[in-house]
Image (cartoon, rainbow, N blue to C red):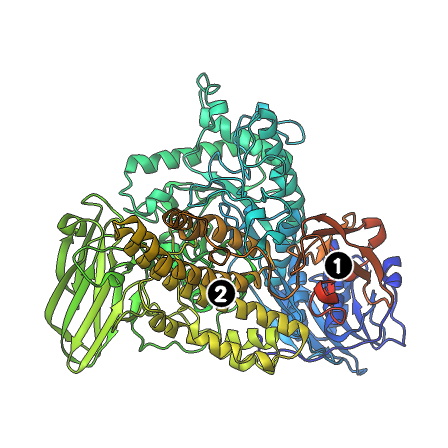
Amino acid sequence: MFEKLVCAFAALSTSMAAFAAGIEAASAERETVIVCPRKASALESFAAREVRRYVYVRTGELLPIVRSAGRADAVVVASKGDRALKPLTHDRDIEALVAQLGRDDYLVRTRDTKRGQRQVYLVGGSDVATLYAAYRFAEHLGVRFYLDGDVIPDKTIPLALPDLDERRSPLFELRGIQPFHDFPEGPDWWNADEYKAVVAQLPKLGMNFFGLHTYPNIEPTVWTGLAEDVGPDGSVKVSYSTRYFSTAMDLGWGFAKRPTSDYACGAAALFDRDDYGSDVMCGLTPQPSTPEGNNEVFNRTGAMFRDVFTLARKLGVKTCVGTETPLAVPGTVSGRLEERDKPVQDLYEGIFTRIMKTHPLDYYWFWTPEGWTWEDTTEAQVQRTVDDVLAARAAAKNVGAPFELATCGWVLGPQYDRAYLGKALPNDVNVSCISRAVGHDPVEPAFAEVEGRGKWAIPWLEDDPAMTSLQLWAGRMRRDARDALAYGCTGLMGIHWRTRILGPNVATLAQAAWDQTGWPEEKRDRSGPVGGVQVNSGIRDIGGTDDDPLYQTVRYSMKAYLFSAPNGRYRVTLHFTEPYHTAKDMRVMTVTIQGKTVLDGLDVYAEVGKDHALSFTFEDVEARDGRIEVAFAGGPDAPCVAGIVVEGAGHAERINCGGGTYKDYRADPPQSPPHPPADDFYRDWALHAFGAEVGKDAARGLSDVDGRLPRPTDWVHGPGGYVPDARSWDDVQKDYAFVDAFAALRPRVVGNGNIERFDYWLNNLEFLRATGRMKCVWHTYNAAIENVKAEENEAKKRRVARETALPRRIELIRAVEAAYGYLLGTVTTSGAMGTTANLEGHTFPGMLDKPGEELAQILGEPLPADAQLRETYEGPARLVVTAKRTCLGSAEPLALKVTLLDEIPLGAAAGGAVHWRALGEDAYRVKPLQLSARNTYRAEITAAEISGRDIEYYVEVVASGGKTIRWPASAPRINQTVVIAP
C-alpha cells in the first residue's frame, strides 16, 4: 500500500508571522516552498497548511506557503481548474490526467522542469480530494494516520522532494465509520473535543462518512417529537428522560453502578467525578428526572452535534444519524397523536424539523429490528417497517429535508429475502447493514441482488462480546472490503466502539476502500470454521459428561467446518449442547458431512434439555481431494456445535469449537476460507510505529495472530465479560506464547515515541494473557469454595475456608491486580477508561464482590487486606490526554484536559504546565495546569492567544520522586501540532 514510501524533504525555516500576514511570493533565498493558489478555497488553504505541518514534524523545517514558486522547488497544492496548474499545459500527459480526475480522485505527481526545479503536484478533482492528496503526500513522508491520532516516526528525514507518480480513485463512494452508542468504551463517553478529534482523522484516512445509531427513547442522539415542540434554534420544549452511559447507572447489559472513587489499583485517578459519563450528562446522571432536565440533555446534545457536524461538513465528511423502525413513540407525545390522521408522518416531520434547525446532516437512516437476525419474521411485520420508512420519506418531502434517507440494521432484510428492502422501497432510499454474527460472517451476499440505489456494507472493526480484549482483524477487513466491492456496494464503513486499539483494523479497511491490488496470495490449504462466532456459555456444570470445558464453549452461526485430511475413510464425532434456549423448536439443525445429510431436524433441547452434552458418531466418512466438510444449517436460531473429532487413516484432529486447548482437543482454529493475508500491512505498520530496529520482527509476530488471538472475554449478560476457565493454566498459557516473543523485542526499541507505542501494544497483549490466567485462578477459587460449602460442621467449614478458599482468594486478587496493571498501561483514550468501568461494574461484582462477602460471612470476620484489591497505583507515572485535537476552528480555544496516573496521592503533583508556541518558533510560552479534581488538570490556550496561527505544544508534569514526564512522549523534539481548520 505504501510502496513508494519515504524519501525525504527539507527546506529553510520561515516564521509563522509571515504566513499569518498573508500569502507571500517566493524569494530566491528559499529552496523549497508550498504553492497555494491565489483564490484557493478554505479547504485548499487548509491542505497547504497540512502539508507544511507534516513536512515540519518529519524534517524540523517550516516551509513558506506562497502564491507562485518562482525559481524554488515546490509542492503545489491545487484542485482541478486552478490557475496554479497552468505550468502543466506544457506537460500533456499530466494535463490529461488532471482533466480526467473525478470528484474524489487525486494525483500525486513529481515533475522536473527544464530549469532544474523539482515540483510535486498534489491535485484533486475537488478541494476535498486535494486534501486527500495532501495526506497521501504525508504518508510518503512516513506519517501514518489512525482514529486516535497521527503516528510520527521518531527518526527525522532530510530534504529531497520524493519522486512520486500516483493517480488514485476510491473504490467506494462513501467510506467511513459507525461508532456505536451504548457502552462506555464507545462514543457514549466522547465529548465534543473527542468527536472532533476523530472526525478530523477521517479525511486523513481517505474516509468521508460518520454515522450514529440511536436506541429508541433511550439515547439523546435523535429527539422524537412534534414540530410544534421545537424552538427556532432547534431547542426542544417537550421531551422524555434520556441518557448516555454513566457509572451512576445500572445498565441492563450486566453493568452495576459503581462510583469511580471506589475503583481499585489507582484507576480512580482517571476520573474527575464519581458519576462519570458524557459531558452532556453532567449534573443530570444517571438520567434526568424533570421535564427541564430532559430538555436540557437533548439541547446539550444538539449543540454538541452542531459543533461536530459543522466541522465534518467543512472537511468533506458526510454525517448520518437515525432511529430504529418502526418508530417508537415516546409516552410524552403518544396521547397527542390520537386525533391526527398521519401520526407517524407527523412525528418524523418533528424529528426532521428539529435536525434541520439544530445541526447539519447528510443522511438519516432507519435501523430495522434486531430480531430480524434470528426470528422468523412475518411479511406483516416487514410491511410495518416499509410503511414506516415511506411515512418518513413523505415527511422529509413535506419539510424539505436536505438529507438523504437510508435503511440499516443487523441484517439487510428479512430472512425470507435479505434483498427485500431493495425491492420494496423507492430507489432514492439507500440500503445498508452491519454483518451478521458480530462480524464473523462475511458481508451479506444479498447486496449483489440490490440495484439502482446506494448500498453500504458495514463490517465489524471489533465485536462487543470481546469488547475488553485486543482484537486484530486486518485480514478480515480485506476480505469484507473485497466482498463488498464484488457485490457492487457503494459504501464501506466499519462499526466499532474503541479507537486506538483498533488501529490496524481501521487502517486496513480505509486502505481497502481505495486499493485492493498487490495483496499477498491467499493460502488455500488451511482448514477451520466457515463463518460463525465463538461463544462461552458461562455454565460451569454440563450434564451427561465429565468433560465440562468441552461443552462450555460453542461456535455459533457457522456454515461449516473444513478439515484437511489424507484421502481415506474416517470416523467423525460431533459434540453438541444447547447453551441458551429453554424451549424446543428454537434451534433446529441440519448437518451434512461431505454433502450427505447425517442429522435432519436436530433439536438438542428437545433431545436432552439445556446445558447437557449430546454426541453423534458417523463411521466410514470418505475424505476426497484431501478434504472433509461438515456443514450446518437451521433455524429459527442459528446452529452451534461444541466439538468435532475426525480420526482415521493414520490421521486425527480434535477441535474444541469456540474454545481453547483442552486435553487433546486443539483450540478453535481461525476461520476458513482464510482472510486475505495482511503481512504486508503489518510490516508497514510496525516499521512506522516502532522503528526499523524491531519493525520486521514485530510485524511477523502480530500478523501471525491476526484473526486468531485468544478470546478470554465473551458476552456475559453484556459486553466483554469473563467466566471461570476450568482448564489448567499450564495448558492455557500455551495459547499466549506469542506475548513473550513480542515482549522480547522491547530492549531493541529506540526513541521515546517508538517506546510509548510499543509499550501500548505490549500492555494490551499482556492484559489479554493476564485475563486468561485470571479466569483459570477464578475457577480454582470457585472449586475451593464449593468444597467449603459442602462442609456441614460450621467450625470445620470455617477452618477449611481459611486453609483452602482464602489462599485461592488471595491468589485471585493478585491475578486481577496483575491484569489491572497492564490495563492501566493501555489507557490513552476514553474507550480504555470505559474498559476499566466495564471491569469494575460488569466483572468484579460477580468475580470478587459477592464471593468476597460470602467468604467473609463463612469466616465470621472481614477479609484481610491482602484478600482485597489494593487502592493505589503502582505503575510508571503517565499522562493521559484523551482528546488529541489536530485542528481547531479560528475562533476556538485549545482546551486541554490532562490526567496524571502516579503513585502519589490524588491532587498531589508537584506542578505542571503546557508549553506551547507558534509552529517553528524558538521560544515556548507556558500555561500552568490547574487542578480540576483528583488527578485531572486543565489548561486553555485562548483563540486570541493562538491568533489564527498553527501551533505546537507539549505537557510537562513533575511526578513522584521529582521525575519529569511529558506528553506526547516524543516531546519536546516532536510535539503535538494543531492546525487552523477551514
Q: In this view of the protein, which residue sits in the foreground, 378 or 737? A: 737
Residue 627 at x, y percent in the picture:
22, 75
Contact check, label 2 and label 1, Cβ < 8 Å: no
**x and y percent of residue 746 in the render?**
57, 78
Neighbor class of circle 1 (other Cα within 10 Å; few <14, some 14-19, many 20+) is many
Q: Quadrant of residue 641?
A: bottom left
Image quadrant of residue 14?
bottom right
The answer to whether residue 473 of the structure is visible from this angle is: no
Say which quadrant the N terminus sits in: bottom right
> What residue is rendered at 36% in x and 77% in y?
523
For image coordinates 75% across by 59% down, the residue present is 979
Tally of numbered tags: 2
Q: First in sequence: mark 2 or mark 1? A: 2
Q: CA distance from mark 2 to mark 1?
A: 36 Å
Q: Which residue is mark 1?
A: 979
Q: Is residue 192 above or below residue 909?
A: above
Q: Which mark is residue 60?
A: none
Q: Nearer the viewer, residue 128 or 477?
A: 477
Identify the amino acid type marked 1: Val
The amino acid pointed to by label 2 is Phe
Which tag is nearer the camera, tag 2 or tag 1?
2
In the image, residue 292 lies at what x, y percent? Answer: 61, 26
Which residue is depicted at the point 58% across and 70% down?
A: 759
Structural crowding at the residue carrying mark 2, measured as other residues with C-alpha within 10 Å and reported as few (<14), some (14–19) or many (≥20) = many
Q: Which mark is residue 767?
A: 2
Helix, strand or loop at disc 1? strand
Residue 676 coordinates in the image, percent (x, y): 41, 71
- Looking at the image, the residue that sits furthest to the left is 620
